[in-house]
Structures are given as structure tokens and as C-alpha cells.
Amino acid sequence: MSEISSHKEALKHSGLKNTKQRNSILNILEKSTQPLTADQIYVALINEKTAINLSTIYRVLNTLAEKNLIIKSSSVSDNKTLFELNSLEHKHHLVCVECKKIIMVDECPFEEYEKKLKEKMGFTILGHKLEIYGICNNCQKKNEKNNKPTV
């Protein structure tokens, strides 16, 4: 199935009209290997020669987030809102506080803990999110080279 038709189906299933703006934004998020800010999405769309206003991007992103087609989160390190396609996959992130790089982590340390919480508390867990903040390998090397101490 092509990206456009899969987005069209997702939009239809969510009760949203299939528009060029929504499809363009969903395509950018699908191509990205990490969450993006609205500004980054705007630049990517301009680079693809898609005419769109930043205010339209924010409006579309909020609508898509309300319908759970995308995930909206905040970066604690710089207080920016990030968006990523909701692929219904379990994800965790390592976030570099210096260069703002976001690295996906495949393993989840909480699977057993979730089971214990459900048994102990009777709480049905629908999901969780984990972001670990630190300094990536590249920034550590730069800091060592410049004799800059790491935090």
C-alpha cells in the first residue's frame, strides 16, 4: 500500500477529510527517523516545494494529534513540542541535551513491571513513554576534544 493511500485510509477512519496539507505533513513524519518540531516540518515541506503556512501546520498537527494519528510530546531539555507518526509501535527515546539529537531505543525495561502493576493495583495500562536525557557519544567526544567537562 502506498503512503498516500494508507494516510487516506487513516484519515477517513478518523473522520477527517483527506487534504493535501494533512497528507504532506503525514508523509514528512513518516519519512523522519525521529520526532520533529512544527518548524522542522515547515522547512521540510518548503524544501519539497509544498506551499503551506506555519499556522496551517500547527492547526493540522493539533487536529492529527487529537485524532491520535500522530503523537505530540514535549522535549524537557528545550521545552519544544515534538510530533511523530503514531505507528502504534512501542518507542523510547534517548535525548542529547547538547545537540538535541533523539535516538530510538528498541528495548523496554517496563514490560514485566507493567504486569506486576496490573496484578498488584488492578490498573489496566494502555501505554507509557520514556525519555532519557543525557549527552550523546558525539557531544562527549567534542567536549573531550575542547576540554569541556560533561554535565
Image: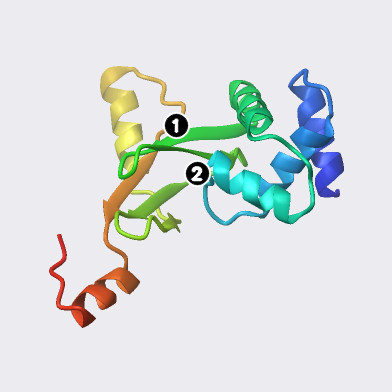
At mark 2, the secondary structure is loop
Per the image, the residue denoted by label 2 is 90
At mark 1, the secondary structure is loop
Give how far across and how far down residue 12 sits, in percent. Answer: 82, 24
Would you call the spot at circle 1 few (<14 residues within 10 Å), some (14-19), or many (20 or more)? few
Q: Amino acid at mark 2?
A: His
**Residue 127, disc:** 1
Would you call the spot at circle 2 few (<14 residues within 10 Å), some (14-19), or many (20 or more)? few
Q: Amino acid at mark 1?
A: Gly
Determine whether, in the image, residue 48 is placed left or right of residue 148: right
Q: Looking at the image, which is closer to me, 76 or 3?
A: 76
Quarter of the picture containing the C terminus is bottom left
Q: Among all residues in the image, which is located at the extreme bottom?
A: 145
Give how far across and how far down residue 144 sits, in percent. Answer: 19, 78
Give the CA separation, mark 1 to mark 2.
Answer: 8 Å
Which residue corresponds to the image point at 79% horizontal and 52% vertical from the top-left?
49
